[in-house]
Image (cartoon, grey):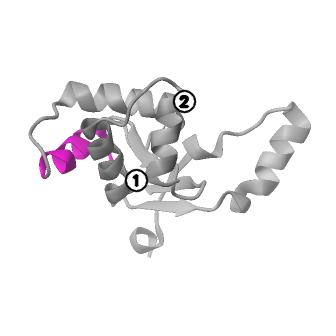
Amino acid sequence: MTHQDWRETLRTRGYRLTPQRELILNAVDTLGHATPDEVLAEVRTHSDAVNVSTVYRTLEVLEELGLVRHAHLSDRAPTYHSVRDHEHFHLVCRNCRTVISVEPDVIEPLTSRLDADYSFTVDVGHLTVFGTCQECTG
């Protein structure tokens, strides 16, 4: 999704792409996966005009509009990522905290089975699987 697409999405839903929103969207894009505090730190490298409550409110609005998504990659704050990135789920190492993005087709047999057996559709973008990575295992 380009900046023009973001502007169009915001405009059609009654919002403007303000400088603060643009800074926050760019920070999420730049960081890949980031908590609101990490987004704030990135935004502050460009402008002191944004505070933590603006970041939280803006991330909430941007998620409602489908421009960012969140996942719970730890017991801390949710972690946000851009929808411009491909659809994916997350593997998180409990030891070193490494986050690995995985294509949804990897779990397609499970999601298909859940749909067939339980009429349940998995929201892959919010899925996080915790375990131990290869580096920490071996």
Residue 59 is inside the magenta segment: no
Give the crowd class for mark 2: few <14, some 14-19, many >=20 residues within 10 Å: few
- Judged by its main secondary structure, the magenta piece is helix
Q: Which residue is mark 2?
A: 12
Question: Along the line of sight, which residue is nearer the eye, 75 or 105?
Answer: 105
Q: Could you give the CA–CA distance between mark 1 and mark 2, rounded to whole angstroms? A: 41 Å
Residue 26 left/right relative to 12: left
| Residue type, numbered disc 1 | Arg
Q: Quadrant of the C terminus?
A: bottom left
The tally of labels here is: 2
Residue 44 is inside the magenta segment: yes
Q: Which residue is mark 1?
A: 94
Which residue is at a point 20% across and 50% down the rendered structure image?
Answer: 42
Range of the magenta residues?
34-45
Which residue is at a point 52% across and 61% down the rendered structure image?
Answer: 101
Which residue is at a point 67% across and 57% down the rendered structure image?
Answer: 104
Direction left: furthest residue = 48
